[in-house]
Image (cartoon, rainbow, N blue to C red):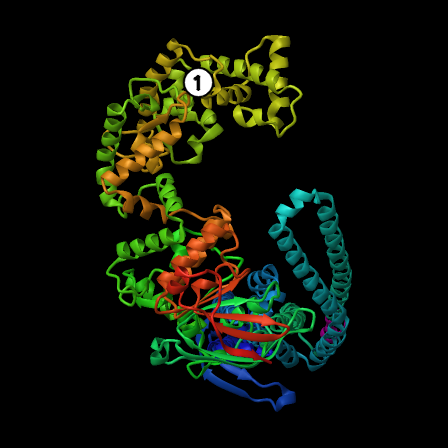
């Protein structure tokens, strides 16, 4: 970033700035004429100076310019105009004044619009430039920079800078020209009045900026305090689990409250200073009209200034304070924005950025193999001590290399050096004669993969995270509206943004030897199975939704699989495991709401307790005569629940088992029951809605309160048709109904296969049903389709919907799928037990036959899988060549072969 804000603005927008300034200059003659017209209306038309010599008519639209005497006098005539009467002259000059008002406002409209567009374009450019620099932050800088503060700077702190960019050059030119035009006009009318106005302006421009210097200091202090507040809130959110675990609510509230008080105090000082300066500025602005009325009136009484000129001068001065005030405000804004810009450039200082190294096409395809040479390596520790000092070694790649340091961070630090996650080290590291630190980012990103102890998972699907390392650059433009695409590209060119769109095709399937997305999904699932996450992907698939366009083959065969599953249950005597959905029967394993809807809600208005308040649903059950019975059932549930939960703590397991009423809702239902017991009156609509919501969640087989009899079940089944008819007539799209011969897109894949509910009353029913589903899926060859749906599973923010093992597995597969020449594993297997970690290690070694693998080991029990062992002892490095893993597996395990390079200082 440029150190000077104005240099940055001029570099990227000088063409637009010059064009807008040209329009500003073009508008000034029209502005000057609009200032002179009131004088002519008063003098020539109203007072009749144009008709003094007995003339019945006077020229209208006569174009001439009279020079004042103090400038030499004289006149320039361009057009003699039209002869009109007194009324005609008055109306003509008035209409002409109105025309110039419209013209001047038109100029202002265009100039302000152009400034706004220019500011938005530059704001877009600045935000993108800052984000591009974020991507260049060195690993060391990332350890000290708070992500929340950086995001706040890009999102919020540059907003006023972007708003100022359009005003940086144009506003002082526009306001300065307006003020100068008004001042020149006043001087033309009377030089002494012009000098008085100039004197007051000089005082304003001298005193006000000096008084505002303290505002700048306070503004900078406020900005830093606001940024620290945002950073602290981000820290609390990142560590909210610790706050919950250790009951630190009061401390955090007090800490944030203290910061808010400090911010309040700063803003209070700003307000005091700001409005004091504003008071003085307004006072000075009103001094000049006083002088005009007094001195100008005196001149008018003496006859040296006519009334029309005095009116015109006062009118011109009325146009003078606004641009002057705005100029002073602009100067204040300039200083304030410059402070903000300086703070932004300090945050994105050059020392925090990695070097920009361009790559050549042939360099990107050249593999990272050959001799890995480390010369004079020095690694400082976190306390200033040298973990590794002046160490050297070499080995040939590809190889399987184990790094062991017996609890020291040396092995992990060397792994991060090779992964370019540490750049501050002494010495030189090269691979095949190429300096590791000088490798272009694009080459390192393709050829080196790093799996650390803390996997970074982005929000989105599992598939999105797995293919993240394949999105190097777009290969083909997406089919889209050509006009919109051309406009997007044109704007990108004007703002320094990329031309590429995320809708383009980004994955080079041909480079991976694949023909289509199905082949890619097959590779992803295969790698996940090798890592041991195949079962999880299968279960995610059963819980996922079906997209008929992407999973057309599965959608067509799902009804067949459903029928085959039902036949399997019948033939194996397991028909009682699942109670199927039947339009003519009540399903005891489903809730009353599910039985009434006979479908799956796809909008919030038909979900949960919102259903009880939905007017369409209420009208349907009213027509079915079911509302009163369900409200009475709600009263029974409320009475039972209040008795059961009486005296229980909020976290008791019964609240989870009977999910009708939460602990915080108990007092409300108790109040409803007390009012009903006292007065016996019917509940109000709001109370009826609350009571109605209780039985809608009731499942007889689960809750077993004995509240459902056969007559009520029959009435609920009959009410289904009312509900469906009501929703269909209203064209409501909030529910997708079950179809025995089709699939329900809103329901999970498992529910579409079962088309029913697992029987709660049969022992081990869920496990047996899962086995039956797996058998049918394998029998009909649907496993691949189910697993593809599993790849669509959402991982949540930072992967919080996944287990630590699943996050680690996705991180490893993300590294493997881009087929790196070097894979570095540094603590990525920590979430797994030793047996699972051993299986994953063997899978990695098997998969990376032609590539290099570096792994940091916590012990020596798995070193036999590697070709070379690198040990760290007292700042020294020892490399040992391992025996052939296959031969060693036949002999005594755990022994190493001869050292190939002894200790090297």
Q: Of 542 and 904, which appears nearest the observer?
A: 904
- Relative to 494, say whether 407 is above or below: above
Q: Classify residue 696 by image quadrant.
A: top left
Q: Can residue 111 be seen in this view?
A: no
Residue 63: percent from left, percent from top: 48, 80
The rendered magenta stretch, by its main secondary structure, is classed as: helix
Tell which residue pokes out farthest to the front in this image: 891
Left or right placement of residue 134 versus residue 554 in this view: right
Q: Of 336 and 153, which appears nearest the observer?
A: 153
Left or right placement of residue 771 versus residue 137 in this view: left
Q: How many labels, in total?
A: 1
Region in magenta: 292-301
Q: Of 74 and 108, which appears nearest the observer?
A: 108
Q: Is residue 273 visible?
A: yes
Left or right placement of residue 685 versus residue 396 in this view: right
Residue 200: percent from left, percent from top: 74, 75
- Relative to 200, say whether 558 is above or below: above
**Magenta stretch contains residue 535:** no
Residue 13: percent from left, percent from top: 49, 77
Identify the residue shown where x is 33% and y is 63%: 507
What residue does disc 1 label? 700
Left or right placement of residue 60 versus residue 470 in this view: right
Q: In which quarter of the image is the C terminus?
A: bottom right
Residue 359: percent from left, percent from top: 40, 79
Q: Of 475 and 359, which appears nearest the observer?
A: 359
């Amino acid at each position: 970033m440029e150190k000077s804000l104005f240099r940055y603005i001029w570099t990227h927008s000088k063409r637009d700035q010059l064009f807008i300034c040209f329009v500003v200059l073009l508008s000034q003659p029209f502005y000057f004429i609009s200032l002179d017209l009131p004088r002519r209306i008063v003098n020539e038309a109203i007072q009749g100076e144009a008709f003094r010599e007995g003339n019945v008519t006077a020229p209208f639209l006569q174009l001439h310019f009279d020079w004042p005497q103090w400038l030499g006098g004289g006149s320039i005539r361009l057009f003699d105009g039209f002869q009109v009467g007194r009324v005609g002259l008055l109306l003509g000059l008035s209409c002409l004044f109105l025309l110039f008002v419209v013209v001047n406002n038109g100029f202002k409209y265009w100039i302000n619009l152009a400034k706004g567009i220019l500011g938005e374009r530059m704001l877009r450019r600045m935000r993108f430039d800052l984000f591009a620099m974020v991507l260049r932050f060195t690993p060391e800088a990332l350890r000290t920079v708070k992500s929340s503060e950086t995001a706040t700077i890009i999102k919020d702190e540059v907003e006023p800078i972007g708003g100022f960019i359009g005003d940086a050059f144009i506003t002082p030119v526009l306001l300065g020209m307006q003020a100068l035009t008004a001042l020149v006009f006043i001087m033309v009318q009377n030089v002494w009045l012009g000098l008085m106005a100039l004197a007051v302006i000089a005082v304003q421009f001298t005193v006000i900026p000096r008084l505002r210097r303290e505002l700048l200091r306070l503004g900078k202090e406020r900005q830093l305090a606001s940024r620290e507040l945002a950073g602290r809130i981000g820290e609390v959110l990142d560590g909210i689990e610790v706050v919950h675990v250790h009951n630190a609510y009061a401390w955090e509230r007090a800490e944030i409250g203290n910061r808010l008080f400090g911010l309040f105090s700063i803003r209070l000082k700003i307000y005091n200073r700001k409005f004091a300066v504003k008071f003085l500025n307004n006072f000075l602005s009103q001094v000049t009209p006083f002088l005009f009325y007094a001195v100008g009136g005196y001149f008018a009484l003496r006859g040296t200034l006519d009334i029309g000129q005095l009116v015109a001068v006062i009118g011109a001065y009325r146009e003078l304070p606004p641009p002057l005030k705005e100029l002073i405000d602009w100067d204040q804004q300039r200083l304030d924005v410059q402070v903000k810009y300086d703070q932004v450039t300090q945050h994105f200082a050059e020392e925090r950025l990695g070097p920009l190294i361009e790559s050549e096409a042939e360099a990107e395809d050249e593999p990272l193999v050959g001799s890995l040479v480390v010369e004079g390596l020095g690694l400082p520790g976190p306390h200033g001590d040298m973990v590794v000092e002046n160490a050297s070694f070499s080995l040939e790649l590809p190889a399987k290399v184990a790094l062991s340091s017996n609890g020291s961070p040396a092995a992990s630090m060397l792994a991060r050096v090779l992964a370019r996650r540490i750049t501050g080290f002494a010495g030189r590291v090269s691979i095949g004669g190429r300096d590791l630190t000088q490798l272009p980012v694009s080459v390192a990103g393709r050829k080196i993969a790093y799996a650390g102890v803390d996997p970074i998972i982005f929000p989105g699907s599992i598939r999105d995270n797995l293919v993240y390392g394949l999105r190097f650059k777009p290969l083909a433009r997406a089919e889209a509206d050509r006009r919109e695409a051309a406009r997007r590209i044109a704007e990108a060119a004007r703002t320094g943004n990329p031309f590429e769109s995320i809708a383009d095709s980004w994955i080079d399937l041909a480079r991976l030897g694949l023909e289509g997305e199905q082949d890619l999904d097959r590779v992803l699932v295969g790698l996940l199975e090798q890592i041991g996450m195949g079962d999880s992907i299968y279960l995610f698939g059963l819980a996922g939704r079906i997209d008929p366009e992407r999973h057309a083959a599965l959608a067509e065969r799902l009804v067949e699989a459903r029928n085959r599953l039902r036949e399997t249950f019948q033939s194996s005597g397991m028909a009682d495991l699942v109670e199927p959905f039947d339009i003519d029967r009540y399903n005891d394993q489903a809730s009353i709401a599910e039985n009434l809807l006979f479908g799956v809600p796809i909008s919030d208005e038909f979900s949960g307790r919102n259903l009880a308040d939905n007017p369409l649903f209420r009208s349907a059950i009213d027509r079915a005569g079911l509302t009163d019975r369900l409200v009475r059932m709600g009263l029974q549930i409320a009475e039972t629940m209040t008795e059961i939960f009486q005296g229980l703590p909020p976290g008791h397991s019964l609240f989870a088992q009977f999910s009708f009423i939460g602990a915080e809702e108990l007092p409300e239902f108790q109040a409803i029951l007390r009012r009903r017991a006292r007065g016996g009156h019917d509940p109000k609509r709001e109370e009826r809605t609350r009571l109605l919501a209780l039985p809608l969640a009731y499942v007889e087989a689960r809750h077993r309160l004995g509240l459902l009899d056969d007559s009520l079940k029959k009435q609920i089944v009959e009410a289904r048709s009312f509900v469906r008819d009501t929703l269909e007539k209203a064209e409501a799209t909030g529910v997708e109904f079950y179809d025995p011969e089709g699939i329900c897109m809103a329901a999970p894949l498992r529910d579409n296969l079962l088309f029913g509910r697992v029987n709660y009353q049969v022992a081990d029913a869920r496990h047996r049903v899962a086995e039956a589903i797996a058998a049918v899926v394998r029998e009909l060859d649907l496993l691949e389709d189910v697993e593809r749906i599993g790849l669509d599973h959402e991982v949540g923010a930072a992967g919080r919907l996944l287990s630590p093992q699943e996050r680690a597995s996705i991180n490893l597969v993300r590294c493997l799928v881009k087929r790196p020449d070097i894979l570095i594993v540094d603590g990525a297997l920590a979430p797994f037990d030793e047996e699972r970690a051993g299986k994953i290690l063997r899978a990695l070694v098997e998969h990376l036959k032609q590539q290099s693998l570096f792994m940091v080991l916590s012990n020596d029990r798995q070193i036999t899988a590697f070709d070379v062992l690198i040990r760290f002892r007292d700042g020294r490095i020892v490399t040992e060549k391992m025996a052939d893993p296959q031969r060693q597996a036949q002999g005594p395990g755990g022994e190493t072969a001869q050292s190939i390079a002894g200790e090297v200082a």
